[in-house]
Image: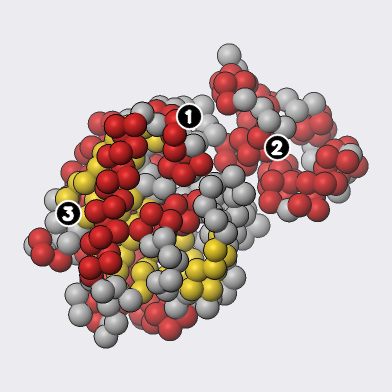
C-alpha cells in the first residue's frame, strides 16, 4: 500500500504548484513528509524511472512527472521498458 | 423530446498541443470530421450537452474515487494544462439537469457520485474546443473512472447510459450527448505508441450497429489489451446505452502515430434511429 504514498507525492508535485516548488527546492526534505519505504525513497531521489514504474506508479502520473524535468519521450520509454 | 444530438470522439492532447506532428492528410480528415459534427450540433438546436468523459488524475486520486461522478456546478474551468494550446475558459454548467440525472439514476439503481467543483483537462476541453468553441452551451460533465482498477464494467456503463438516455429524452429541453475518449492507446505505459487498429475497428463497428449486447460484454481484459487509455471507451458504451440501439456512422478513423492514439469520430443522428 505504500506505493500509494509514492503516487500521492508524485501527483502532488504534478498538480500543486506549492508542492512542486518545495520538491524542486529540496526533494529529500519534501519526501520526508510522505510515508515512503527506503526503496521508494531511493528510487524517487535518484530519479530511477525504471524502478518507480516497476513499483507500480501509474504511467499518467509518472510521465508528467518526468516532463517536469524535460525527459525526452524516447528516454522515458526506454526506462520503463527496461531496455 | 428525442436526444437532439449524439456523437463520440477521441480527445488525444496532440489534437491541439502538437497537431502539426500528424501527417496533413490525417489532420485534414480529423478537422473535417470535427467541422461536420460541429455543424450537426449547431443545426440541432441543442440547449444542453451531457458530456460523458474521463480525466487524468485532475480531480480524482486514489484517496477517494468512485465509478462515476456527475458535475453539478454552475460553471467549470479548464484546461488545467498550460501547454494544451486551448485558451483557459469558463464553461457553464447546468445544475438542474445534473440534479435530474442524479435523481433518475438513484431511482433506477445506479448511484454515481457528484461534485460541485471540478476542473476540466484535455479529456473534456479538446472535444469542447472543436465542437462548441464558444464554450457558451451549458455542459453536464459525467466522469468515468478509467484510471484506477477496478474500472466500472461495460455492462454497468451501459445501464448508466440507459438512465442518461431516459433523462435526455424526457426533458422538455433539447439535450445532446457527447462521449469522449479512446480509442486504443497506452499513454505513459510500456506500449505507448502502439495502436490496435483491429480492436478499434471492431469496437466502432459494434457502436455503429447499436450492438448493445456485444458492447456490454466487453471485458476489462479486452480494453486493457488495447492499452490503458482504451478504458475511456466505457463512455462510448454508456452512449450506446443512452441511444438504446440507435445506429451510427463512422465519420473518421485514423491511427495517428504522432499522437500515439487511434482517433475515431462517430455520429448518431436521430434520422437513422433504429
Q: Position of residue B53 (x, y in %)?
A: 42, 57
Q: Which residue is under mark 3? A: B248
- Kindly report the distance in space between the C-alpha atoms of the residues bearing marks 2 and 1: 19 Å
Q: Colour scheme of this structure image?
A: secondary structure
Q: Are marks 1 and 3 on the same chain?
A: yes
Left or right of B245 in this view: B175: right
- Kindly report the distance in space between the C-alpha atoms of the residues bearing marks 1 and 3: 29 Å
Q: Secondary structure at mark 3?
A: loop
Left or right of B64 in this view: B139: left
Q: Residue at x 69, y 51 (%)?
A: A15
- From this view, report whether residue B82 is shown above or below residue B257: below
Q: Position of residue B63 (x, y in %)?
A: 65, 57
Q: Which mark is residue A19?
A: none
Q: Which mark is residue A68?
A: 2
Q: Position of residue A76 (x, y in %)?
A: 61, 25
Q: Chain of mark 3?
A: B
Q: Position of residue B123 (x, y in %)?
A: 47, 52
Q: Secondary structure at mark 2?
A: loop
Q: Which residue is under mark 1? A: B192
Q: Secondary structure at mark 1?
A: loop
Q: Residue at x 66, y 24 (%)?
A: A50
Amino acid at each position: 500500500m505504500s506505493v500509494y504514498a509514492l503516487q500521492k507525492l508524485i501527483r502532488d508535485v504534478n498538480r500543486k504548484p506549492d508542492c512542486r516548488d518545495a520538491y524542486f527546492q529540496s526533494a529529500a526534505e519534501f519526501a520526508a513528509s510522505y510515508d515512503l519505504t527506503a526503496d521508494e525513497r531511493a528510487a524517487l531521489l535518484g530519479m530511477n524511472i525504471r524502478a518507480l514504474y516497476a513499483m507500480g506508479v501509474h504511467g499518467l502520473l509518472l510521465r508528467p512527472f518526468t516532463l517536469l524535468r524535460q525527459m525526452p519521450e524516447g528516454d522515458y520509454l526506454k526506462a520503463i521498458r527496461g531496455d | 423530446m428525442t436526444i437532439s444530438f449524439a456523437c463520440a470522439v477521441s480527445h488525444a492532447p496532440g489534437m491541439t498541443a502538437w497537431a502539426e506532428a500528424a501527417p496533413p492528410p490525417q489532420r485534414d480528415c480529423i478537422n473535417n470530421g470535427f467541422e461536420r459534427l460541429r455543424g450537426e450540433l449547431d443545426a440541432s438546436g441543442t440547449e444542453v450537452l451531457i458530456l460523458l468523459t474521463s480525466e487524468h488524475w485532475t480531480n480524482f486520486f486514489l484517496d477517494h474515487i468512485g465509478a462515476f461522478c456527475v458535475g453539478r456546478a454552475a460553471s467549470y474551468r479548464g484546461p488545467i494544462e498550460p501547454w494544451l494550446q486551448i485558451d483557459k475558459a469558463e464553461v457553464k454548467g447546468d445544475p438542474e439537469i445534473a440534479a435530474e440525472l442524479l435523481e433518475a439514476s438513484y431511482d433506477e439503481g445506479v448511484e454515481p457520485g457528484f461534485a460541485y467543483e471540478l476542473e476540466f483537462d484535455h479529456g473534456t476541453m479538446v472535444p469542447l474546443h472543436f465542437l462548441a468553441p464558444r464554450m457558451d452551451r451549458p455542459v453536464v460533465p459525467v466522469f468515468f473512472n478509467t484510471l484506477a482498477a477496478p474500472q466500472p464494467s461495460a455492462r454497468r456503463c451501459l445501464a448508466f447510459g440507459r438512465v442518461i438516455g431516459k433523462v435526455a429524452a424526457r426533458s422538455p429541453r433539447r439535450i445532446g450527448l457527447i462521449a469522449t475518449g479512446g480509442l486504443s492507446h497506452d499513454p505513459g505505459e510500456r506500449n505507448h505508441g502502439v495502436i490496435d487498429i483491429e480492436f478499434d475497428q471492431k469496437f466502432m463497428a459494434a457502436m455503429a450497429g447499436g450492438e448493445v449486447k456485444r458492447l456490454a460484454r466487453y471485458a476489462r481484459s479486452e480494453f486493457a489489451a488495447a492499452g490503458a487509455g482504451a478504458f475511456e471507451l466505457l463512455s462510448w458504451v454508456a452512449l450506446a446505452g443512452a441511444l438504446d440501439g440507435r445506429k451510427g456512422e463512422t465519420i473518421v478513423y485514423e491511427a495517428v502515430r504522432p499522437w500515439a492514439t487511434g482517433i475515431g469520430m462517430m455520429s448518431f443522428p436521430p434520422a437513422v434511429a433504429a
